[in-house]
Image (spheres, grey):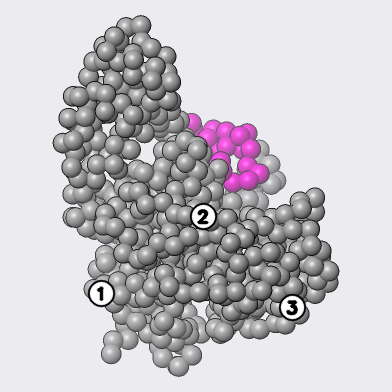
């Protein structure tokens, strides 16, 4: 057996799996170490991928050659495109997956990946010599050497589980915590703190009165996560279900608050504001008489269900009593209660944009140990860390993504520039250039970049080039095809929009909000003929062309703004200033610039507390 590798990845969650796959696919000899070989990319909370802004991240991972989108499509049991009532910048794909098959498919793909090896064990120490990693030691007293290490320990570092006043050590229920690494890293100067997250009760579907719930079916159009997979979804599609708490439910929960770890002082760390527990909801929104709950299947054939919206760390008896006040759960049986978990994380401002630590060379952090929450945020970080760990071993240039290039770029820049004071969750509102970062065009933005790295395959880039050529041809047709007023006016009146006074281009008609390509297609013979020639990925190409036509002005304007802002990110300042000596900077600015040590003027401008006057001072000192 080999005991020396280019890259070692610690932890096989979503971050670890993407990191290991990226490093190995790029050619690094890679070792993935996990405590449990049956839990690759385990969905420890909701068995779903995507959602608001998160779906964009999964599509970006796929466009870059990662595996998350492929695995999600192959294990999907329900798909929906969220926010369809809003503009395309807000559309966000989301998919329920079969939890067990998701993990199995990840393992299959990883075992098929060249250069990737596995070891089941717990890492107890990272070996560091002269400020650089050179290996790890494990609980079985095995030493592995490495040129680069990616740490993706998730919730396992000193993990503690809370169910009422009961406390258990663990990274997940029935799985042991990991000890030693936090203390070692703190001893060499890393800053660490504690965070909290939680998960809901799992319900036995045989005990649920589904006739007292609202059915929430999925969608079955062409949308998926991966740009490679265009086959029908292989698994049976299942419904989700909606129900509501009531005032009686809230009374039961309130009576149990004295035993809630969140309110009796047992938990001191901060939980995710945007995914609160049910007990937090009834306290924060005391005026609400009901809260919406989603009952979501855990797999294609299992009777186990996840109750989204009912995350809790209350005692088992309180959780059960509260559930039974909801009519559809009056006879409920559960598989296990909800619980909260506290774990260690590291201040992400201690990282570069490559996710390499500033204190130790070739050591990378990715996932929840950087203060994030969510599979998608973790997977995106893992992919970037894996790419850069490979480059650290083989002399490649650092690979980063800008805020105008990807949600992954926004995520990492927010982490390393602003830090976190609560578990970080991605939202579309965090991306100032979100109209440039749509879910439909992630392949257009990122696949060529990944192909240049050697990660995206030739198959991917050829698919992209053919798709782009078809979109360009369709847009060109619409730009040049003339429409005569007298021929189209009866159709326009039928479609509820104003008649024309003179002829226009087809593009001009498509700019109207009431019209789209599919509504006009049957009424314009030449248009229908042109569309009929698009035989490959037809719906995807039509959607992409229509978005480009309808939103061209907004997209061009946003791209211009992004280019102006990006100029500040081209001005390098790392190592150029002794901030303590610049008296014209505010005291707060000196302290924060010293702590973050930004790479560029652009990054400095995004540090909370840095004013425009501080940035102007730095620009003047640079002679600009």
Badge 2 element: strand
Q: Where is residue 315 drawn, in percent x and y?
A: 74, 77
Q: Which mark is residue 317?
A: 3
Q: Where is residue 473 drawn, in percent x and y?
A: 20, 31
What residue is at 19 percent from the left and 38 percent from the top?
Answer: 534
Tell me which label, 3 or 1, sits earlier in the chain: 1
Mark 3–mark 1 distance (CA, rounded to whole Å): 46 Å
Mark 1–mark 2 distance (CA, rounded to whole Å): 36 Å
Specify whether residue 605 is painted magenta. yes
Magenta residues span 601-624
Q: Residue 216 carries which label?
A: 2
Q: Where is residue 557 drawn, in percent x and y?
A: 43, 27
Give the residue pinned by disc 1. Answer: 112
Query: Which numbered disc, 2 or 3, marks the residue closer to the eye?
Result: 2
178 is higher (above) or lower (below) than 220: below
Specify whether residue 567 is painted magenta. no
Give the main secondary structure of the magenta stretch. Answer: helix
Residue placed most toward the observer, 597 or 278: 278
Quadrant of the drawing holding the N terminus: bottom left
Residues at marks 3 and 1 touching, judged by CB atoms closer than 8 Å: no
Q: Local crowd at mark 2 within 10 Å, few (<14), some, or many (≥20)? A: some
Q: Quadrant of the rendered structure where residue 373 is?
A: bottom right
């Amino acid at each position: 057996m080999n005991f020396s590798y280019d890259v070692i990845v610690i932890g096989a969650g979503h971050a670890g799996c993407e990191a290991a796959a990226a490093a190995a696919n790029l050619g690094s000899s890679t070792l993935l170490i996990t405590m449990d070989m049956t839990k690759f990319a385990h969905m420890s909370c909701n068995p779903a991928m995507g959602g608001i802004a998160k779906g964009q991240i999964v599509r970006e991972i796929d466009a870059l050659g990662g595996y998350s989108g492929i695995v999600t499509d192959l294990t999907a049991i329900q798909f929906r495109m969220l926010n369809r009532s809003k503009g395309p910048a807000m559309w966000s794909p989301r998919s329920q997956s079969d939890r067990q098959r998701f993990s199995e498919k990840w393992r299959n793909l990883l075992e098929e990946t060249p250069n990737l090896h596995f070891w089941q064990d717990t890492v107890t120490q990272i070996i560091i010599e002269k400020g650089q990693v050179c290996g790890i030691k494990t609980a079985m007293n095995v030493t592995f050497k490495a040129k680069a290490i990616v740490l993706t320990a998730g919730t396992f570092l000193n993990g503690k589980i809370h169910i009422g006043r009961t406390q258990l050590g663990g990274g997940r229920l029935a799985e042991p915590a990991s000890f030693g690494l936090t203390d070692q890293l703190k001893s060499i100067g890393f800053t660490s703190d504690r965070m909290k997250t939680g998960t809901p009760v799992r319900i036995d579907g045989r005990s649920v009165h589904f006739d007292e719930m609202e059915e929430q079916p999925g969608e079955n159009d062409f949308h998926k996560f991966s740009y490679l997979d265009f086959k029908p979804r292989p698994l049976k599609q299942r419904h989700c279900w909606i129900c509501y708490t009531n005032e009686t439910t809230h009374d039961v929960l309130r009576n149990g608050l004295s035993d809630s770890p969140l309110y009796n002082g047992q938990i001191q760390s901060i939980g995710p504001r945007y995914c609160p527990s049910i007990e937090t909801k009834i306290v924060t929104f005391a005026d609400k008489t009901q809260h919406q709950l989603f009952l979501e299947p855990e797999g294609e054939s299992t009777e186990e269900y996840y109750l989204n919206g009912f995350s809790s760390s209350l005692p088992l008896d309180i959780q059960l009593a509260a559930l039974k006040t909801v009519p559809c759960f009056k006879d409920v049986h559960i598989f296990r209660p909800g619980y909260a978990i506290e774990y260690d994380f590291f201040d992400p401002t201690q990282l570069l944009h490559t996710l390499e630590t500033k204190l130790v060379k070739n050591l990378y952090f990715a996932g929840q140990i950087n203060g994030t929450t969510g599979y998608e945020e973790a997977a995106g970080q893992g992919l970037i860390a894996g790419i850069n760990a490979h480059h650290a071993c083989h002399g490649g240039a650092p690979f980063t993504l800008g805020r105008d290039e990807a949600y992954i770029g926004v995520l990492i820049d927010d982490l390393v520039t602003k830090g976190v004071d609560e578990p970080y969750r991605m939202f579309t509102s965090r991306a100032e250039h979100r109209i440039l970062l749509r879910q439909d065009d992630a392949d257009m933005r990122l696949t060529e970049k990944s192909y240049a790295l050697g990660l995206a395959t030739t198959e991917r880039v050829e698919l992209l080039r053919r798709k782009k050529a078809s979109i360009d041809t369709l847009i060109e047709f619409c730009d040049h095809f003339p429409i005569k007023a007298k021929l189209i006016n009866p159709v326009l009146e039928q479609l509820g929009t104003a008649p024309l006074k003179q002829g226009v281009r087809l593009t001009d008609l498509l700019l109207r909000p009431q019209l789209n390509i599919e509504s006009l297609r049957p009424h314009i013979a030449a248009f229908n003929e042109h569309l009929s020639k698009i035989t490959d990925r037809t719906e995807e190409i039509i959607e992409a062309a229509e978005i480009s036509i309808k939103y061209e002005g907004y997209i061009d304007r946003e791209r211009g703004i992004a280019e102006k802002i990006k100029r500040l990110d081209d001005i390098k300042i790392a190592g150029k200033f002794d901030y303590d000596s610049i008296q014209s900077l505010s005291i707060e600015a000196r302290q924060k610039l010293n702590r973050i040590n930004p790479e560029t003027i652009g990054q400095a401008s995004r540090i909370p507390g840095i004013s425009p006057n501080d940035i102007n001072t730095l620009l003047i000192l640079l002679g600009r």
